[in-house]
Amino acid sequence: MRQEYGDLRRTRASLFYLVAYLFPLGAGLLISPTATFHLLGSQTEHASIAWRLFGGLLFVLALVAARLIRKRISGGMSSPLSLAWRLWLCSVIWLGRPET
């Protein structure tokens, strides 16, 4: 059983890196895109709905990567249909949300 997980050690390490920057960036873009860009050094205003949608995409990708880490499976074993369903659901939620 231990040998089975030995091959994915480097893959899991790179996924931890991916999750470490996708979660905060995705959450920041979902909550406040302008403030997130100000933290990154931009001084201009940005259209928020497109960046909120992109933040949702990043957040969903972070959830998928976290699931791959937790289940100890390689990226090729995850279901593409599951990823498509999550992307669709995220876009419906954020595009249907009224702009404030």
Image (cartoon, rainbow, N blue to C red):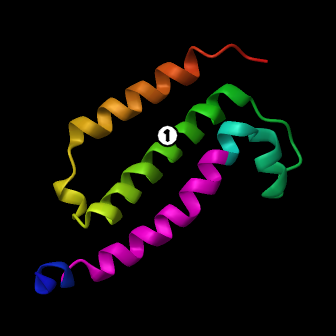
Q: Is residue 7 above or below residue 54?
A: below
Q: Residue at x 45, y 43 (%)?
A: 60
Q: Please state the horizontal and vertical placement of residue 78, each as a whole percent of the image.
A: 22, 51
Q: Which residue is mark 1?
A: 57
Task: State how many labels appear.
Answer: 1
In front: 36, or 2?
A: 2
Q: Residue at x 26, y 38 (%)?
A: 82
Q: Residues within 10 Å of mark 1 (few under 14, many from 20)?
A: many
Q: Is residue 42 above or below residue 81?
A: below
Q: Going by the image, does 17 lie left or right of 45? A: left
Magenta-colored stretch includes residue 31: no
Q: Please state the horizontal and vertical placement of residue 44, each as a whole percent of the image.
A: 86, 42
**Residue 97 lies in what quarter of the image?**
top right
**Residue 77 lies in what quarter of the image?**
bottom left
Residue closest to the far front: 1
Amino acid type at mark 1: Leu
Q: Is residue 12 above or below residue 51?
A: below
Label 1, secondary structure: give it: helix
Magenta stretch bounds: 7-27
**Residue 56 lies in what quarter of the image?**
top right
Q: Please state the horizontal and vertical placement of residue 87, each as a whole percent of the image.
A: 40, 33
Magenta-drawn stretch, dominant element (helix, strand or loop): helix
Magenta-colored stretch includes residue 26: yes
Quarter of the image where the N terminus is located = bottom left
Q: Going by the image, does 93 lie left or right of 35? A: left
Q: Please state the horizontal and vertical placement of residue 51, each as a whole percent of the image.
A: 65, 35
Quarter of the image where the C terminus is located = top right
Q: Residue at x 20, y 85 (%)?
A: 6
Residue closest to the far right: 43
